[in-house]
Image (tube, grey):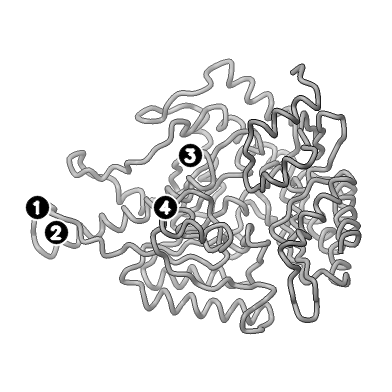
Amino acid sequence: MDNNVDELAEFDKKYLWHPFTQMKDYVNDQPVIISSGKGVYLTDNTGKSYLDGVSSLWVNVHGHQRPEINSAIIEQLGKIAHSTMLGLANEPAIMLGKRLVELAPEGLSRVFYSDTGATAVEIAIKMAFQFRLHQEIDDSIKETGASDIVKYKYVKTKFICLENGYHGDTIGAVSVGGIHKFHEIFKPLLFESYKAPSPYCYRCPLGLKRDDCGMACADEMEKLVVDHHDELVAVILEPLVQGAAGMIVAPDGYLRRVWETCKENDVLMIADEVATGFGRTGKMFACEHEAVTPDFMALAKGISGGYLPLAATMATEEIYNGFIAEYEQQRTFFHGHTYTGNPLACAAALANLEIFEKEHTLLKMQDKIKLLHEKLEPFNELDHVGDVRQKGFLIGIELVKNKPLKVPFPLADRVGIQVIMEARKNGLMIRPLGDVIVLNPPLCSSIEELDKMVEITKRAIIAIT
């Protein structure tokens, strides 16, 4: 494009409305306008380069401008860019579905496509509800002997989610979310869900240490499931790491215990792997760490390697079979999106997964994860770092005003924002979640690049706090 730097900045402020951004502040600053990317670097339209410390919002896996993914998209463009999947299929979507089933925890055997993490969650919520409804109708037929259903009982309508949980920003996803500042304002629009306590947070209301806090929260979850199993559709959670809550990492055993509790009480489980999937925790999917096969698994973000919008909701064969019936029974899953199974996005995703295999990405990550742990350890000695949380490449550094008393900074101080802006001056793009500084590098980052990201982050925290 021929627009100059100042003109683009003017147009940006005049015409655009940015997500999760207070525009009153934004329009007073000089915007950073990204023009290109290569590897783990972004370059703005003034020519300045930045390390992509949050993988362009947790999606970039193997780096920007990967020739293999570029070529896959270009090749697919030579065939067709899009055709509907309503009653039709396309080759990339079919082959990607096969590959996802091969990679997913054993038992997840069906793939329903959409285009964002929130829609993947919405689909799981709706599928789970309709599956339970079909069971209720079948039970009613057995009890009454009726051949026609006059009305639905809607016995099972409730979900359990976690406090501090985040599953996207559509209304259904928000209804099973638990982050006050994101979700409270929309409360009049939401359906009610039961909230279980987070498996661990820096400010445990009971004052418990991490593992004790996690198991106490597991007890609370178990009690909720047992007490309400007759009306429950499903439990939904982010396995191992609550991302948007500030990288809250569950203690070992929590996920499996929740899964076992669900199985024992005939309650479905939805694992939201939008943020944790595709290698972020050190395994392809977080559920693998504790040998858990949920009834549903929501996938997005890293699925296409950070190239094109794509999401998938995976389900077990039992769930799928619950929708198989004669046409007149109307058990079709009446849900779909215009760009469901888009061939370009699916082609990118297939190339993304081929790179995982060809380059042994997960294996190579293990030494990098250890390095990150070692480099992050000194952060605990900083006066205003209250907690450092890490699972794989998912890192949260919580900043506090008073460390011994765990007192947070006043909101008006905008400490998290100040830190990330300081890091930006020094060539690193990161994001805050309140006063939790998030690092989530591309999986392809070298040892040297990771070292540089951590060092810039540390210097920025010291400079501001």
Which percent across, then down, holds residue 189? Answer: 41, 55
Question: Which label is found at residue 18?
Answer: none
**Callout 2 amino acid:** Ile
Graded by Cα atoms within 10 Å as few (under 14), some (14 to 19) or many (20 or more), the crowding at tag 1 reads few
Where 51 sits versus 439, above or below?
A: above
Mark 1 or 3, nearer chain start = 3
- Residue at 49% across, 55% down: 174
**Callout 4 amino acid:** Thr
Question: Which label is found at residue 114?
Answer: 3
Q: Which residue is mark 1?
A: 147
Where 42 sits versus 160, above or below?
A: above
| The C terminus - image quarter | bottom right
As drawn, is 94 to the left or to the right of 308? left
Cα separation between marks 3 and 4: 17 Å
Mark 2 or 1, nearer chain start = 2
Q: Kindly check if marks 2 and 1 are in contact, taking CB atoms under 8 A apart as contact.
A: yes
As drawn, is 249 to the left or to the right of 38? left
- Residue at 75% across, 31% down: 9
- Residue at 43% across, 45% down: 110
Mark 3 or 4, nearer chain start = 3
Q: Kindly check if marks 4 and 2 are in contact, taking CB atoms under 8 A apart as contact.
A: no
Q: Nearer the viewer, residue 40 or 288?
A: 40
Name the mark nearer the viewer: 1 or 3. Answer: 3
| The N terminus - image quarter | top right
Cα separation between marks 3 and 2: 34 Å
